[in-house]
Image (spheres, rainbow, N blue to C red):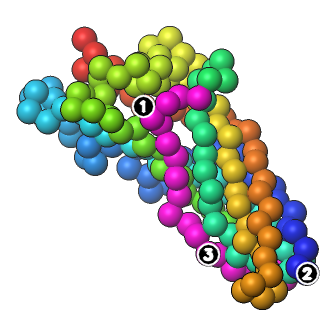
Amino acid sequence: MPSAPSVTVGNVYTPQNAQGLLINGNPAADYSTTMLLTNPIKQVSYEFAINITIYSPSYIDIGFRKTILKDSNGNVIQNLWANSTLTHLDFPPRTSTVIPVPLYMTMISNSQDSLLTSASFATFINQCGLSGSKKLNATITLLFDIGAFAWIKYYPTFSFDKVVDCPEISQLVSYLG
């Protein structure tokens, strides 16, 4: 049976080529008050990343599982998700490998209303700009798919608490009046 890897997660950072805060898929700087009247804010997203160092005693495959974002009181911010595009990375045995993992924080309106009327969005805005610490607490969970054969596998998970710097939200705050 393969052995579980040792995992170290570095600090959260903003990737060099990140686009910053996106409103409805467009850069926040391109979103105007006129657009707000005709195209309500339904989605806000932001890219960040972490470096994961893995020492693999065996051949393994990794898939990103989830990230839970919390306010400064440790309360989960509802309707705010983070996910990643990385899955199925191969790690050679008896080797330490550093992998940058891109993460995308997204808040989506669950109704016909704009996000601006959402209680969870208000929590996000307060935490990140108006009166908050400009940071979100995150619990990042990694799932490993380890197995010597397709029918003999196990799935250890590793969770890490990290702090995520908030995106620049002055553009969003200006829409709140």
Tell me, yes or no, if residue 153 can be seen here: yes
Quadrant assignment for the N terminus: bottom right
Region of the chain picked out in magenta, as a range: 76-96
Image-based side of 166 in relation to 111, left or right: right
Q: Which residue in the protein does label 3 denote? A: 88
The disc, 1 or 2, on the residue closer to the chain's N-terminal end is 2
The image quadrant that residue 102 belongs to is bottom right
Quadrant assignment for the C terminus: top left
Q: Secondary structure at mark 3?
A: strand
- Kindly identify the amino acid type of the residue bearing the numbered disc 1: Glu
Image-based side of 93 in relation to 50, left or right: right
Q: Residue at x 31, y 40 (%)?
A: 43
Q: Secondary structure at mark 2?
A: loop
Number of the label disc, if any, that sits on residue 16: none
Q: Residue at x 81, y 86 (%)?
A: 148
Image position, residue 26 (x, y; %)? 25, 46
Q: Which residue in the protein does label 2 denote? A: 1
Q: Secondary structure at mark 1?
A: loop
* Residue 97 sits above or below residue 10 on the image: below
Say which of marks 1 and 2 sits in front.
2
- Kindly identify the amino acid type of the residue bearing the numbered disc 3: His
Please check the rendered image and state whether residue 90 is part of the magenta-colored stretch, yes or no: yes
Number of the label disc, if any, that sits on residue 168: 1
Residue contact at pointers 3 and 1, CB within 8 angstroms: no
* Residue 126 sits above or below residue 167 on the image: above
Gap between marks 3 and 1 measured at Cα: 32 Å
Residue contact at pointers 2 and 3, CB within 8 angstroms: no
